[in-house]
Amino acid sequence: MPTVPATAVADPVPGAGAPHLPRQPDLVQLLTPEGQRVEDPVYSIDPTPDELRGLYRDLVLVRRWDTEATALQRQGELGLWASLLGQEAAQVGAGHALRPDDMAFPTYREHGVAWVRGVDPLHVMSLFRGVDNGGWDPVETGFNLYTIVIPAQTLHATGYAMGVQRDGAETAVLAFFGDGATSQGEINEAMIWAASFQAPVVFFCQNNQYAISAPIERQSRVPLYQRAAGFGFPGVRVDGNDVLAVLAVTRAALAAAREGQGPTFIEAFTYRMGAHTTSDDPTRYRLADELEEWKLRDPIARLKVYLAHEGLGDADFFAGVEAEGDELAARIRSGTTSMEPPPAVSMFDAVYAEQTPPLAAQRAEFEAYQASFEGSSS
Amino acid sequence: MPTVPATAVADPVPGAGAPHLPRQPDLVQLLTPEGQRVEDPVYSIDPTPDELRGLYRDLVLVRRWDTEATALQRQGELGLWASLLGQEAAQVGAGHALRPDDMAFPTYREHGVAWVRGVDPLHVMSLFRGVDNGGWDPVETGFNLYTIVIPAQTLHATGYAMGVQRDGAETAVLAFFGDGATSQGEINEAMIWAASFQAPVVFFCQNNQYAISAPIERQSRVPLYQRAAGFGFPGVRVDGNDVLAVLAVTRAALAAAREGQGPTFIEAFTYRMGAHTTSDDPTRYRLADELEEWKLRDPIARLKVYLAHEGLGDADFFAGVEAEGDELAARIRSGTTSMEPPPAVSMFDAVYAEQTPPLAAQRAEFEAYQASFEGSSS
Amino acid sequence: MTTETLTIGKALNLGLRRAMEDDAKVVLMGEDIGRLGGVFRITDGLQKDFGEARVVDTPLAEAGIVGTAVGLAMRGYRPVCEIQFDGFVFPAFNQLVTQVAKMHARSQGRVPMPVVIRIPFGGGIGAVEHHSESPEAYFAHTPGLKVVAVSNPVDAYWGIQQAIAAPDPVVFLEPKRRYWEKAEVDLDATPEPLFGSRVVRGGDDVTVLAYGPMVKTALQAADAAAEEGRSLEVVDLRTLSPLDLDPVIASVRRTGRCVVVHEAQTTLGLGAEIAARVTEQCFHSLEAPVLRVGGWDVPYPPARMEEEYLPDLDRVLDAVDRAMAF
Amino acid sequence: MTTETLTIGKALNLGLRRAMEDDAKVVLMGEDIGRLGGVFRITDGLQKDFGEARVVDTPLAEAGIVGTAVGLAMRGYRPVCEIQFDGFVFPAFNQLVTQVAKMHARSQGRVPMPVVIRIPFGGGIGAVEHHSESPEAYFAHTPGLKVVAVSNPVDAYWGIQQAIAAPDPVVFLEPKRRYWEKAEVDLDATPEPLFGSRVVRGGDDVTVLAYGPMVKTALQAADAAAEEGRSLEVVDLRTLSPLDLDPVIASVRRTGRCVVVHEAQTTLGLGAEIAARVTEQCFHSLEAPVLRVGGWDVPYPPARMEEEYLPDLDRVLDAVDRAMAF
Ligand SMILES: Cc1ncc(C[n+]2csc(CCOP(=O)(O)OP(=O)(O)O)c2C)c(N)n1
Ligand SMILES: Cc1ncc(C[n+]2csc(CCOP(=O)(O)OP(=O)(O)O)c2C)c(N)n1
Ligand SMILES: [Mg+2]
Ligand SMILES: [Mg+2]
C-alpha cells in the first residue's frame, strides 16, 4: 500500500490509493474515519444525542435494506438492484438536511434519501421488481421519482426551484447526481440556469469514484466541486462518508438557497463499495486493494465508534437497531415477494391526463384480444 | 455617461457602460484603443512592419466585404447576412494565429477568419444567397463549413483534435463560438472531452456581449474565460478589439495545443456593432449610448493610428487598401448578383455518398414531374 | 360579439395574453421572447405587461428551456416554451421524449405535465439551414405527447389557449410562413375542440388532407381543380397526435380517394400513418391507394431550391390526377 | 471454409475485431466499452488488443460521443459509437439529426460521414425504464442516415463490418434480447449486401415482415401457422433506411396479404411507411389492408407488463387471421 503525503490528496485527480482522507481546507470533515470529532473553520454542527442516534439508526437501516434488496435480486425477486453500499452517510446526511417543504430530485441510487424522506421502501422495491416506475407520490413525499436518464432531473430541480422563487416560498431544492453525470450537457445547463436565475437549488454530487467502469479521472482532471466556480457559484467538497459533515454542509447550502443566495455545488467524496448494479462485475475494472482501503473509511463504523466512545450508545442501543433492521428486512422481503404487477391494461391509462380516442380504442382492442384467450388454456 | 472606476471592469458582470477598457491582469491588451502599444507580462508579439500592414489590410477588407454584403441583403440579393462589424480584430487576429495545417471550426459569423484562410468570399455569399450551404472545401481550406446549430461545431472540433492526436500530427484546432453558445450543453461536453483527452483544441469565444437580444449577464455571472478552470484547463480574456493581443494569445494557445498541453479557453472581449443579422432590430433591446462607447474602441481605428504614428503606413498605403476594398466589393457584388442556384434536382445527389435505390427512384420521379411542365407554359 | 381582423402572429400574441390573464401560473420561456418579443414578435409586449418572472428570457439552451419547464410544471406552473426555429428543437429532444412525454405515465398519473412547446415550423421563407424544418413526425411517434398544427388565425387564437389549458404536454406547431395571413377572429366565440380535425371545404372526388401551412395550399388546389370540374374535399387535420380521422374516414368512404399533403419528408411522415389507417378502415371503399405529397427524402435544401422541395398546388393536383387515374 | 458457432454478441465482437484489423482508421467509442468490454461485452477484449486510442472509454455524454465522432470522421477516421442502451440515444439526437445526417449534403459531398452508431435495441429483457426502446423510426425519418437491424449471427458478423466500411452514417441496431442466440457463421463466405431485405421462409398465404428481434417471432408464428395449414412467407427486412421492398412487393403480389411486425410503438412506426408503400405498389393485388402488429402507443411499460406490450407469436397469428378474414 503506497503512502501518499497529505498534500497529494489536493492533487487534480484524487481518489483511490490514498489511506484515509487527511483533513485539508479542500475537504470538510467533522468525524474522522477513526471516529474522532474534529472541527471545521466554516461548517459546524451540534447534534443532540437523539439526533446522533437517529442518524446512526438510519445509516444501519438503509444498509440493511440495501443488503436485503441485493439478496432478493440474486434470488430472482428483483430484476435489478442499484446498491448504495458505502454511500449511506452521503445520502442520510443530505436527506436529514432537507426540511419537509423542500424537494429532492434523486437518481436511481438514492434509497437512503428515500428512507429519510419517509418513502416506503416497498415503493422503491416495486420499481426494481419491474412492477412500476416507483410507487410513491413525489409531491407528497418531497422526493421525485427516480430518474434513470442521466442527469435529466437536474434541470427539473432547477425549474422547480424557479417555481419556488415565483411562489416566494422558503423552500430549497436538492438535486442528486453522480460523478459521471457531471459530463452530460444537461447538468451543465442546469448549473448555468441556476446561476443565471439564482435559483434555490443545491447540486449534490456523490462522487463515488466511478461511473460504472469509468473512473472519475475520465470525467474530470480537477476536483468536481471546482466546476461551480466556473459558473459563478460556490462549490465545496465534503467527506461523503462523514454523515455529520454532509449534514452540516448540505444544511448550510440549503439555507443559503432559501435565503436567496442562489445555488451551491456539493461534492460528497465517497466510494461505491459494491457493483454499479447487480448486473455489473467490478472485478473487471478495479482492484481489490482499493476496496480494502475504502473499507477503513466506512461511514457507519466511525459513527458507531464515536457513539460508543462518547457513551451515547450502549450495547442495548446497538442491538436494538440491529433488531429493527431484521424486522425491516423481513417486511421488505415479504412485501416484495408478494408484490404483483397491476393488470397489463393499466399501461393505457396514465399515458395522458386526458385519454385520447385512438388510445381508448387501442385499449379496447387490447382488452378484446386478452379476452379472446380466456377459457382457451390450450 | 456614468463613469465607472477602473476596477469595476473586473466585476462579475463586466461590459457595457464602462469607458474604454483599462488594462488589468484579467484582460490581455497590446494595443490600446488610442493606438498605443503596451506590454503584457505574459503575452508578447513582435510583428514586422509588413505583418502589421497585412493585419490592417485584412481588417479593412473584411469590414468592406461585410458592408457590401449588408447592402446586398438590403437590395434583395441575399436572404440574410450576419454582420461581423466590430469583431474584425478578433477574427483576423485568430485567423492569423492559425498555421496552414491547422483546422478552424467557425459559426455563421466568421467571415474574417474565412478571409484569412483564403476562402473565396463568394463561397460564403452563396450560403447567404440561398444557393448552397457554403461553397468552399473544408479540408482544403482548413476551415469547416459554417455551423448554424449552436454550438454543434465545438464537439466536431474536439473530435477532429482527437484525430490529430492519433495521427501524431503537429496540428491544432480552433473552435469558434459566441457568448450565448456557452450556455449550451454540447459546448460544455466539448470542453469536458477536450480536458479529459488533452486534445489539441483551442476554444475561441467572441464575447460580443449579446446573443441576439440576450445580454451576456443572462448566460453568465462571471467572466466567461473562468469557465475553463472548472474543467481543468486555462482560460484567458483578451481585448477582442486589439488584433495584436488576439494574435498573441491565440498563437500561444495553439502552440501549447500542438505541444500536447491540451486545450485553452480564449474569451475575446468585443462588441457586435451591428444587428444580430439583417433580420434583427437591436434598437428593441439596447441603448445607442452603449454603441457610442464601443465605437471608441474600434479595432481598425487603433491600428491605423498606430501605423501612422510609427510611420508604418502613409497616405498612399491607406489609400491603396481602400482601393483594394473597392475592388473587392465590386467583385463580391457582381459575383453575388450573377450567382444562380444549381439545378434543383441536385438536392438528391449528395444526401449519401452511396445513393440509395428509393432516393434514385424519387429523383427520377422528380425529373419526370419537372419534365411534364416543359413546353406547357400556360 | 367582438371580432378583430388578425394575422396568425397577432392571434397567437393575443391568445397568449389572454391565457396569461386567465391563469397566473402561465409562464412563457424562451430565447429572446422578452425584450425583443421573439424573433417573430409572437410574444411582443408580453414581458412589458406581465414582467420578467412570467415572460422569461432564458440562456441559450433548448434542453434547459424544456427541462426547467418540467420542474416548473411539477411545482404547479404551466410553462409555455418557445423554440426559436423548428431546427433547434433537437437539443431538447431528450427532455421531450424521455421526460416530458413520460412523466405522467411514469408517475401513474400523479405528476401532470401541462407544458406547451411552441414551434414555428415549415419552410417557404427563404431561410438558411435549420430554419425550415417540419419535425412533427418525431413527436407524433412519441406516446405521451400531443401534437397540433394550426393553419389560420382563429385556430391560432383559440388553439394556443386550449393547449395551455390542456392537462397534457402539447407540441404546438405554428406555420411560420403564414404568420402574416389574416382573418376575422370572433373573440367571444365558443371554440372548436383542439383535438379535432375539420372539413374546411366539401367535395366529392378526392379527399385531400393537410395541416399547418399546407392547408392553404390544399385549398388553392381545390380552387384550381374546381375550374377543371373536379371536386376536392379538404380536411384540415389540426391535431396530429391524437389523430382525429373520423371525418376523414367518412369522407374517403364517399370519395374513394385520398391524398395527404405535408412539407415534412415523405418517408415516415404523417402521411404514412394516415395512409395505413385510412386504408385499413376504408379498404373496400378505396378506388386508389392513399397518395402522399410530401417533402422529398432529402435534407431541406438551400433557399433558392426550396420551391422545388415544397409541395405546391401543382404537386397536389398531380397527385389528385394520379388518384383519379387509378 | 472456416465456420464457427457464434452468438449474435460474439459475432459482433468478431466482426468489430476484423474491421479493426482491416482498417487502422476504425476507432470505437462509448461508455464502458474498454476495460469493461461494454455492458453486453460486445467489445470484450478489444481495448486490450488494440489499445486505448482505438477503443475509447469516453466521458458519460452521448452528444459528446457522436459529436466528436463527426470530427474524427472529418479527420479521416471511421468512428464506431456505442450507445449503451436505446433509451440513451436521445441526448445525441441533435448531433445525429442536424450534423451526422446532414454533413454530406451540406458539403455537397465534400465531407463524407462514415460513422456507425451501434445501438442495442428492443425489449424483452426485464429491464428498468429506458432500456427497452425501439427508436428506429426517428432515424428512418431522417434523410442522410441509413438504418439497419440485424436478426442473427451471420448478419451481425458481416453487417457490422459492412456498416463500418460503408461511406455513409449507419445506425446499426442490435437485437439485445437475442444477443445470446447462436448460429453457424461461415467466416470466409461472401456476405449478402447490407442494404437488402431477404425472404427467410417461403410461403403463399400471407407475407409477414419483421426485423431485428421480431424475425424470430415471425418465424415461430410461421411454424405455428403451418401446423394449422397456413403458409406464411417471412421477410427479414434487414435494412430500414433505405427500405428494400422489392422482395416484399413480389411476395405480396403473390400472397395478397401483408402483416408487418415490430416492437416500436405502432403509430408512425416502420409499419406505417411499409403499409403506405406496399399498398401503393400492390393496390390491385391486395386482398386485405396491410396490417400492423406493433407495440401499443404507450410508453414502454414496466418489466412485468412487457410481455403484454410486445408483439408475440399469438399477436402475429391474430393479425394473420384478420388478414385472411378480410
Ligand atoms: C443518458 C444516459 N446514458 C447512459 C446511461 C447508462 N448508465 C446508467 S448509470 C451510468 C453511470 C453513472 O455514473 P454516475 O453518474 O457516477 O452515478 P453512479 O451510478 O456512480 O451513482 C450509466 C452510464 C444512463 N442511465 N443515462
Ligand atoms: C441550437 C440553436 N438554438 C437557437 C439558435 C438561434 N440563434 C441563432 S444565433 C443566436 C444567438 C447566438 O449568440 P452568440 O452565441 O453570442 O453568437 P453571436 O450571434 O453573438 O455571434 C440564436 C439564439 C441556433 N442557431 N441554434
Ligand atoms: Mg459514480
Ligand atoms: Mg454573442
Image (tube, coloured by chain):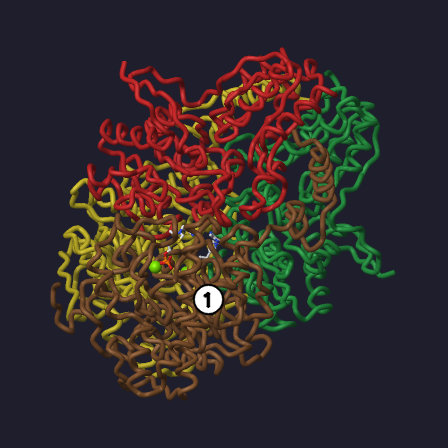
Chain colours: A brown, B yellow, C green, D red
In depth, the one of B355 and A75 nearer the eye is A75
Left or right of C245 in this view: B350:
left
> Can residue D22 be seen here?
yes
> Can residue A237 be seen here?
no
In depth, the one of B184 and B136 nearer the eye is B184
Label 1: element kind: helix
- State the image coordinates of residue C5 (x, y, percent, origin top left): 78, 55
In the picture, which quadrant includes the N terminus of chain C? Answer: bottom right
Is the residue marked by circle 1 packed among few (<14), some (14-19), or many (20+) residues within 10 Å?
many
**Which residue is under mark 1?**
A193
- State the image coordinates of residue A371 (x, y, percent, origin top left): 72, 37
Left or right of C300 in this view: D266:
right
> Can you say whether C263 is above or below B234 in the image?
above
Residue type (three-letter) at the residue carrying disc 1: Trp
Dot 1: chain letter: A
Left or right of D6 in this view: C96:
right
Left or right of B206 in this view: A141:
right
